[in-house]
Image (cartoon, helix red, strand yellow):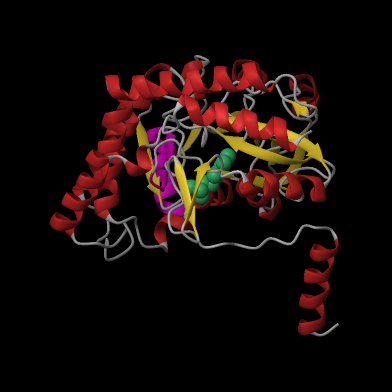
Amino acid sequence: MTWQQRIDAALDARRAADALRVRTPVEHGAGRFLIREQRQYCNFSGNDYLGLSQHPAIIRAWQQGAEQYGVGSGGSGHVSGYTHAHQALEAHLADWLGYPRALLFISGFAANQALIAALTGKDDRILADRLSHASLLEAASLSPAQLRRFAHNDVAQLDALLDKPCEGQQLVVTEGIFSMDGDSAPLGEIHAAAQRQGSWLLVDDAHGIGVTGPEGRGSAAGQGVKPELLVVTFGKGVGISGAAVLCSDPVADYLLQFARHLIYSTSMPPAQAVALLAAFNLIRSDEGEARRQRLAGHIRQFRAGVGDLPMAITTSQSAIQPLIVGENARALQLAHTLRQQGIWVTAIRPPTVPAGTARLRLTLTAAHESADIAALLEALHVASE
Ligand SMILES: *Cc1c(COP(=O)(O)O)cnc(C)c1O
């Protein structure tokens, strides 16, 4: 096959499976409303769970950071791109989350790739929940370490895998709140299983940080668990973008030597670090708590009203509420029907989710009004008649 034939064949296969991904530019995409082609939709497809992406105080902090530092960091953190703003944010995160150190990364994807690549070698084994995010599973499969995936949240299977002989070290990988299902991992049991074997646990809490746990400290703090490696990302509940790895002093020093995404990549703009610090101060404040309570109220309202729909409802208690419909075409058609009623939702299809589990991934945010949730429920009932 030529390059051209190979690419055409891959696209044709996606089209035939109703799985071709296309992007549509929007005038405004984050927060309560999505605006596209001058039409306003109520937005149930973002990850801005607390509505912080539009918060005036955080916008102002970013502006002030840009006034002070300019718009770019000017280089890798190892050269000249590590400012007092980056250092202050790392210190704040480490202190708040109870770890000796925090290291900033440009994205959660980069953090996971860097961490797994820097830590694992060929004699090691990575044991990852089957539903772990693509950034984790891809890093694990690219790593020279062996990858074993355990059934979703199945601690007994994890235990059995951990018992198999391994020449090197074992790293257990899971998430605080799963991105496509919205359910939580039993972190206490998973950590205990890992500890029995002297293995380390990596928890990616992209969807929990800011949103759950005391002061918004996330899933691990909420469950009273302290994984050896905690990844938090800033593009969801924190409303911005970027990520951090929370770890011990020696691990942080090691990552500064061997995490290539840190060394060979421009650090985040200092102004973004200033905005992130403002976002974390807000998350820890009474206003942050009020936003979490408001989101919890929306989740209760949604779950109370969704029960009699003819679709598979999951047990998710989080801001991520998937409606699993099965076929790709059905998910696309439902999303289309809802859009006609002014409700923006995304159909999520394989390979992002397992085959046969195409779904509407609905996300709720503190930016919504209670009337928005009522309108969503009403539209879902009409669309599924
Ligand atoms: C979104 C997400 C990531 C990627 O984070 P970005 O900062 O968006 O690159 C990593 N892990 C999980 C579980 C996610 O949901």
Q: Residue at x 76, y 23 (%)?
A: 154
> Which quadrant, please, contains the C terminus?
top right
Ligand 1 visible in quadrant: top right
The residue closer to the viewer here, 207 or 306, is 306
Where on the picture, by quarter, is residue 374?
top right
Q: Is residue 157 left or right of residue 141?
A: right
Q: Position of residue 164 (x, y in %)?
A: 80, 29
Residue 138 percent location from the top left of the image: 67, 51
Q: Residue at x 26, y 30 (%)?
A: 281
Residue 248: within the magenta? yes
Task: Tell me, yes or no, if residue 152 can be seen here.
Answer: yes
Residue drawn at x 49%, y 19% as measured from the top left: 296
Instruction: Report the side of 61 relative to 298 (left or right).
Output: left
Image mark count: 0
Answer with left or right where residue 288 lies relative to residue 243. left
Would you say residue 161 sits in the magenta stretch?
no
Q: Nearer the viewer, residue 307 or 245?
A: 307
From this view, report whether residue 191 is shown above or below residue 337: above
Given residues 161 and 225, the one toward you in this image is 225
- Vertically, is 135 above or below 225? below
Looking at the image, the residue that sits furthest to the left is: 68
Q: Position of residue 269 (x, y in %)?
A: 29, 56
Magenta segment range? 240-258
Q: Is residue 19 left or right of residue 201?
A: right
The relative height of residue 357 versus residue 193 in the rendered view (above or below) is: below
Q: Is residue 319 visible?
A: no
Residue placed at 22% from the left, 39% from the top? 57
